[in-house]
Amino acid sequence: MAAAVEVEDLVKTYGTTRALDGVTLQVPQGGVLGLLGPNGAGKTTTVRVLTTLLRPDSGRASVLGIDVLKDPDKLRRIIGVAGQYAAVDELLTGRENLVLVGKLYHLPKAEITRRADELLERFELTAAASRVVKGYSGGMRRRLDLAASLVNRPQVLFLDEPTTGLDPRSRLRLWEVIEDLVRDGTTLLLTTQYLEEADRLADRIAVIDTGKVIAEGTSDELKDRVGGSVVVVRPANSADGDRAFAALSTVGEPVRGASGDLTLPATTGVTLVTEAARVLEEAGIAISELALRRPTLDDVFLTLTGHAAEQAEEQSA
Amino acid sequence: MTTPSLDAPAQGGLRWAVKDALVLTGRNLQHTTRQPELLFFSTVQPVIFVLLFRYVFGGAIETPGLSYVNFLMAGIFVQTTAFASTSSAVGLADDLSKGIIDRFRSLPMARSAVLAGRTLGDLARIVLVVLVMTAVGLAVGLRPASLGGMLGAIALTSLFGFAFSWIQAYIGLSVPNVEAANLAGFVWLFPLTFASSAFVPLDSMPGWLQTFANATPVTPTVDAVRAMLNEGLPLQAPLLRSLAWIVAITVVFSILSVRKYRSVT
């Protein structure tokens, strides 16, 4: 399958910070790539380059064979982008927002009306269509924002953290809508810091950290990189975290999770569970949980980056 | 396309640039009608100024050959339009902070359209405020020499406000948030408009301040407006200088603003 999105060695520097430090990735036509990483990893910067909003210092990026630097206006006609914040006009109604975007795509008037109706219907906004967006809920704004990015029937869609800040119910609704789009054949590049989201929506995942893609593959391939399974240890007393870490270091390579859990890639399988239990008992550390389980994407992230996604987020915030 | 550019106009060139600008002017005007309270308060403030200057300072300021109201209104007009231009800075900073500018920049529309739509929409608002000022002026004793002069004064002050909107557009795209846009749009307007011939005759100021006042676009504009409202004042020289300023500001700041818009993050 031909690549719909091709990114090669993108570099973007702000002062001394390398926001993008050689990002390379591809999305096949009709595919969904999840760009997974903590805040400040370079996800948004990558999307901004691909949607002609930002000029990279070096590197190449093209969408459906159109170079983002050479023919931006041609590119803008065939892509759709919905950003991290719902970029909708609060003082206009839902319908007016879509009509405004349609006019700026220079679509014929009748087509704009038809398209606006269709999208309002699809995103269950018909009842609220004549209301000013100011009164919309967060989930409704996101749906309207997504609808606005679809006015031109884009062949490639970029969604930058589409569900960040939404409550679980709204998130689920939006996921269903996105899954519908993908079924219709839209190529999608999606950024997220939710491992669950990447797992559910993307058929391939690129893990990005400090401006570099550090791993790429299907969800299962990435999980295999951690080993078949992981051992999870939760000290009964969170103050014991450092001592537990030291004890576990004698039998493996523990990493700290966000919630105070320690995880060990279980290269030796069940044996590691008994070894971990032994060293913890010898150190006199009480534990509330000790388990062997299939790795989640959280574990993948921990193993690949040495820090939890949530921790990195706090540091950069 | 032979030259790599992020910013080539959409096919359709100038025609689409005008169309896009008008679409966004419409949006700006829709905003105005949906926030009537903003329009109300942006009109109340200059009305208060008219009343304060007319009745508080009016008796103390000597304006040989003219009633103070006839002297004052030219200054009030120009200051009002300068103040009203700050809505361009605030409006753009607001769009920027909400990510709406990002949406527009991702569309195949003219790079000048968002800014032109903003300044043209704000021009409509400026004209409206000037008309209200005119009514208030007439109510407190303004007696323009001729109808033509009155209309000329309205036109020149509106153009002056439009030019200043382009400075404000540049400010709005350069500051980090709406609050900063509000402040950065306003602070320099106080010294610029007060240190001019707007409210007192220039010769009552110390020499260095007169030099400053004469070097700004405010003084020639006020002088030209005043000459249109009254008889016997020199018009041609200040009018030409004022128009030169208006053209220069509009050209320079529209180029700077569009360049800023292309790379703004």
Image (tube, rainbow, N blue to C red):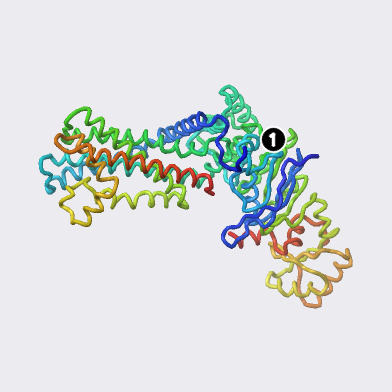
In the drawing, does residue A248 fall left or right of residue A40?
right
The reply to whether residue A197 is in sight is no
Q: Which residue is mark 1?
A: A155
Percent position (x, y) of residue A180? 72, 35
> Does dot 1 land on a helix, a strand or a loop?
loop
In the drawing, does residue A84 fall left or right of residue B202?
right
Percent position (x, y) of residue A64? 71, 38
Quarter of the view holding residue A137: top right
In the orientation shown, which residue stands out farthest toward the front? B2
Percent position (x, y) of residue B87? 39, 42
Residue appearing at x 18%, y 54% in the figure: B205
Which amino acid, by three-letter code, is at mark 1?
Answer: Gln
Residue appearing at x 14%, y 36% in the figure: B232
Residue closest to the eye, A104 or A55: A55
**Chain name for mark 1:** A
Residue closest to the eye, B28 or A237: B28
Quarter of the view holding residue A317: bottom right
In the drawing, does residue B75 fall left or right of residue A298?
left
Residue closest to the eye, B181 or A55: A55
Residue A223 versus residue A33 in the image, above or below = below
Mark 1: give few (<14), some (14-19) or many (20+) Cα within 10 Å.
some
Number of dots carrying numbers: 1
Residue appearing at x 14%, y 45% in the figure: B58
Percent position (x, y) of residue A174? 66, 40
